[in-house]
Amino acid sequence: MSSNYKSNVNNGVCFMKTTVDNVCIKGNSYLISTSNIVTDISNDLLELIGYSKDDIVDKDLCEVFSKLLRLHRKAFEQIDIKNNIECYIFTKSLEVREVLISLLQGQDVKSNIYTIVENPNSRLNDKLIFVENLFKENISGVAVFSVPDLILLKTNQKYLDFIDSPYYSMENSIGKAVREVILGYEESQVEVIWNTILETQKARYRKGLVTNKFAREITYWDSYITPIFDNGKMKYIFINKREVTERVVARQEREELEKVIQYQNEEKTNRASELNVANIELAFQNEEKINRASELNVANIELAFQNQEKENRASELNVANIELAYQNEEKENRAAELIVANIELAYQNEEKENREAELIVANKNLEVEISKHKKAEEEITKHEKAEVVIKKLNDELEKKNYELNKVIEMKDEFISLISHEFKTPLTVINSAIQAMEVICKKDLSDKAKGFLNKIKKNSNRQLKLVNNLLDITRLNAGHLKVNKKIFDIVVLSRSITESITIFAEQKNIKLSFSSTLGKKVIGIDDEKYERILLNLLSNAIKFTPVGKSITVKVFQKIFEGKCKVCIQVRDEGIGIPQDKQELIFERFGQVDNSLSRQAEGAGIGLHLVKMLVELLGGEITLESKERLGSTFTILLPIEKAKETPIEHMIKEISDNRLIQAMNIEFSDIYI
Ligand code: ADP
């Protein structure tokens, strides 16, 4: 089919092959547009460009030419001006077609008819058949550009790999001018080269080019740019680029290496010459060494001799050392002894210091003592003087005492005499009363009996006083004798206590007796013991208020290492003030007069009791608290005496004497 066109064009014959809107179209390859929209396209043209009718019809005319047919913008603009232009379009598979585009005006003003006829024998593939393999192998980058517009007509991917984004794909680069696809082309080295080729029309070979002006990293490539002529006219430029980065880098590295090796070689040469010098120096030193060695030999012989000498000295030294060690040991022993001696000395010093301190203290004490002594001596002289005076006074006192004792004796004798004088009529009165009670009991009226009772009581009181006075004077004169008999002190005490029950009952006082001892037989003067106990009991009754109680207790106690019998009389009476507790044992000692008035006592009972207790070898103590009561305790020694038959003992206790004694002792208690 293409051969038909060829012949037609070549012959310059216009075939009226078809008419469109009565317009004669030359040839069968055309495209019609109305208002810049493609309305029709011939089948021949479709066959040429490889598109289908649907791809083209109803599309914008500009879009069809520039985007689908890739007609260069510059050419497209010229269609309207020139009516006929030679240019390149591209098929759907991006193969270039060299065509003649003519524009015919249709009947309608808005209609255009474009005939697009391929130039005969213009196919690039046919012309560059010898490099076709280069395109296919894709080992080196190859490309064909048009002259003079430098439009990329054919290339392979390897070439496009040298081109920056987005033009490294066929789709984006085919049909575009070189200045469009190579970024930074303007005023670059590349532009200079291209222009030079266009001017000189000579091939150019560039080796190891560095692409450092473009956006890509540095790469090295060899580039062959060859103009291709058609009918003696430069029509294409063929480029063959081969990346040699690896080779260049390897060469550069090799060069670097060579430089290093050369440097090392130089260094080696320098070292060698240095070594040479060093060797000469060494040889010299060796010679020196040999000289030294021979000197050393001599020195060694000398040294050996000296060593021998040394050894001799050493053995001498050894002996000396042993001697020294022995001396050292001796020294150490001495030192140890010295240390011990020092310690001893220190101890002795300490002792000495202590002694000294003690001595100082003793001296001071002595000084004090001496001064005291002096004072004492002074005192003694004073004393001696005083003693003379005292002796004088004592002599006088003794004289006075003697006189006083005489007076007291005389007084006691007088009291004794008076008492006796009192006692005789009293005894007569008492006997008369007793006789009256026994003999005239029935004849006496109650009134007379009352008077008689009063007389009896008062005579008894008188008798008590007289007896007491007599006993005291006898005791003082040492005439009162102790008459000890064997008694069970428990039985004796209980009998005496029980004998006064009547008085206690009449005053509503609870009287009780207790003993921790079942039986205790001792030698005792029962008469005097009776007087003692009755006296204490009569005081207890006298000074104990109605309703309270009196207790008599007998027990045993160890006192001053000896076993003693204790008789305790405890009352819940008015008690005795602390300051009066000694006074009441003195003759005429009373707590106060009101008491004596109340109880009509003379204040000599306890004095006599004390004297009697002491006569029996015992002692009496008092514990008392005001308003709480008093406790009199008698401690009697446990003594042996002449045996007395028990019956006799019991008879004696129940004797009238006790009743009589009790009556006398209790005569001053008003019931
Ligand atoms: P008097 O004959 O006055 O009783 P006493 O020598 O027996 O003499 O007693 C001396 C004084 O001791 C009494 O006047 C009394 O004040 C006091 N006295 C003795 N016994 C008791 C006692 N049990 N309770 C309180 N006072 C006592």
Image (cartoon, grey):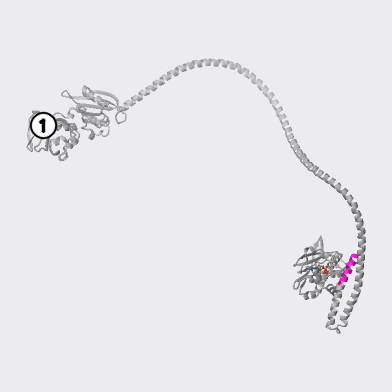
Q: Quadrant of the C terminus?
A: bottom right
Q: Is residue 295 left or right of residue 357?
A: left
Quadrant in the picture for residue 407: bottom right
Q: Identify residue for label 1.
A: 5
Quadrant in the picture for residue 637: bottom right
**Helix or strand or loop: what does disc 1 sit on?**
helix
Residue 552: x %, y % from top left = 79, 69
Residue 386: x %, y % from top left = 88, 51
Q: Is residue 7 above or below residue 610?
A: above
Q: Is residue 644 visible?
A: no
Q: Nearer the viewer, residue 656 or 522?
A: 656
Name the residue rendered at 79%, 41% in the picture.
Answer: 359
Q: Nearer the viewer, residue 376 or 42?
A: 376
Q: Is residue 261 left or right of residue 236?
A: right
> What kind of residue is marked 1?
Tyr
Q: Quadrant of ligand 1?
A: bottom right
Q: Nearer the viewer, residue 609 or 526?
A: 609
Residue 123 forms part of the magenta stretch: no
Q: Is residue 109 left or right of residue 420?
A: left
Residue 479 forms part of the magenta stretch: yes
Q: Is residue 385 visible?
A: yes
Q: Magenta span covers which residues?
A: 464-481
Q: Nearer the viewer, residue 548 or 1?
A: 548
Q: Is residue 296 left or right of residue 397?
A: left
Name the residue rendered at 93%, 58% in the picture.
Answer: 399
Residue 240: x %, y % from top left = 24, 27
Residue 496: x %, y % from top left = 82, 72
Q: State whether the magenta stretch is mostly helix, strand or loop.
A: helix
Q: Is residue 378 above or below residue 153?
A: below
